[in-house]
Image (cartoon, helix red, strand yellow):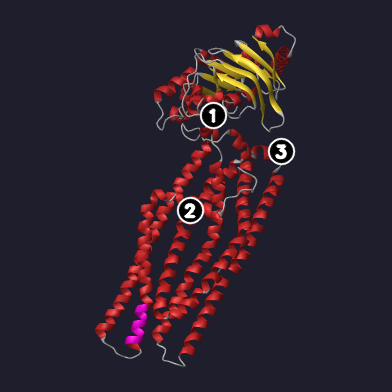
Amino acid sequence: MREDNAQQPSDTFLFKRLLAYSLPHKARFIVAFMMLTVAISAEMAIPWLAKIILDDVIVPQQFEWPHLIGLVSLVMLFYVISALFTYLQAVSFRHSALLVINDVRKQLFNHVLNFSISTFDKLSAGKLVSYITNDTESMRDMFVSTIPTIIQGSLRIIAIFIAIAILDWRLMLLSLVLIPVLLTTMHLYRKISMPVFNGIREQISNINGRINESLQGMALIQAFNQEKAFKEKFEQENQRWFEFRTKSIAIDSFMLIPLTRLVSNLTAAGIVAWFANASLATVVEIGTLYAFLNYIERFFDPFRQLSMELRKLQVATVASKRVFELLDEESEQNRYPQECVEISAPHDIEFRHVDLSYDEGNLVLSDVNFVAKGGQFTAIVGHTGSGKSSVINLLMRFYQHQKGAILIGGQPIESLPEVQLRKLFGLVSQDPTIFSGSIKDNIDLSHDRPNDEKVMLAAKQVNADHFIKRLTDGYDHHPGHGGASLSVGERQLLALARAISHQSSVFLLDEATANIDSETEEAVKEALANIQEGRTVITVAHRLSTIKNADQILVMNKGKVVQSGTHDELIVQAGDYRELYLTQKAQEENEHQNSTLGLASINAA
């Protein structure tokens, strides 16, 4: 999202953009508007009927009961009509508003799903959750409450001015002076409160981000005894929110109800003084005075209500700015072509003088050149930080390289549409993600109702079928949040089955055996052997024992490919690969020796 405020959209532009979302539901809004018009018309007729009853019946004491009963019945009827249509228009407006926000929220989430991974580097999960839930909820308040209040208030003011003009056009002209005064007050409120509401929304996002970060890292926080430090960080964010809220309360308390009520009371006093002065020269009808005071009181109602709604409008304006900034972020779908291209098979993958920097400064990959032949097994090894996983990130197009070319089947990677690229590659990462749902749902992500036959075939190919059948409910077993009921190795086998179920031509394994035990490693190696036939496999490997049979091994150091060849070729050469292999072999021998000594000690005991 843009960090600068150089070209912030105007409130008018934002309001128009928000209203554009209501166009698909305009029929519902029109019906609600018509019902609101009926309700206000009935409401405005009541003071006029009361004037007639006072001036024509009660004051002159001309009690013609049929006439009086008819007038009273008409008043009661208008009260019923006003109440009924007020209820109906409120329900209609609110239902329409829910449909609008439902559309916004779906569009926003769908847009976020298509963000590049680099966008998620800039935005925390907590902030994104805040945008999609809290900010859209604030926008809902505007459609449910603020817009109907503006429409209702405008109609009431027009109706009141018509009624006052009929009673006395001079008082109507005097009443017009009140509108600029009230509008100026509302404008000052918006100008003063906007920075405060910006701060409130930003702090809510920061708090959500802090909570999300803490919950995700709770094990580490407790392991390193950092509860106090994280508590203090949270309290700092919460204190800033408290300070902004305190300022908001002070502004609201002075500029909303009290100021509007002061103007209202002064106006009522002025009208009474006007009629008192007029009574010196002519007879003033009590019904006319009552009608004037009633209409003036009703005249201020919309401004009071709108004053209360201004706070929601401010919040909705700030929220909509943040939501539209998120929607204006370029997605992966818009960045690349939409039509599929012909790529040659088998899918050779070639890097030509590729450079990559995550921060536009330090190069993570520098002048990388290699060809991974289609249908073959290519392994990438090297020390931590050598750039191995960055190769996978570029192939998945999670990030964009700054220099050079990446070719897939002879075609530049930029020419492939997102759907074609994602279908081509099956990714298995070091820390596989297990979603909510059953084992079956986690293997076949492509359908609302997973294909049982395809799921079981994929599981058998990677030897995951054995442990799945031992689970409660088998393939219908729910492993819990993050796969809590599964071991690391079992989660890895599920990820491999998922990649096979995806029916990809190229498998990308990013240190898929780094965190598993030796027994599971053998199962993964056997699974890799099963899936390799007819497919291209590129694996980033930590354990060199898993890639001895690779057709090509690329050795990376400081972002460059420094060696390439087979295991037999590289092991006899002086260089990084031989050094890595001998170091790992020595470690494995020491672990085996320690394990043997431990068993001997136990037996001796």
Residue 140 shows which numbered tag? 2
Residue picked out by circle 1: 486
Q: Position of residue 470 (x, y in %)?
A: 47, 25
Q: Amino acid at mark 3?
A: Phe
Number of marks in the image? 3
Q: Amino acid at mark 1?
A: Leu
| Amino acid type of the residue that numbered disc 2 sits on in the rendered structure | Arg
Give neighbour class at mark 3: few <14, some 14-19, many 20+ (Cα, 10 Å): few
Residue 224 badge: 3
Instruction: Give the magenta part as a residue range.
Output: 48-56
Direction from residue 289 to residue 80 in the image, left or right: left
User: Which element type, helix, strand or loop, lies under badge 1?
Assistant: loop
Q: For the residues marked 1 and 2, what is the alpha-carbon distance in whole angstroms? A: 41 Å
Q: Judge depth for marks 3 and 2 and give the one in front.
A: 2
Coordinates of residue 516 in the picture (x, y in percent): 61, 23
Instruction: Answer above or below: position of 192 versus 96.
Output: below
For marks 1 and 3, the one nearer the N-term is: 3
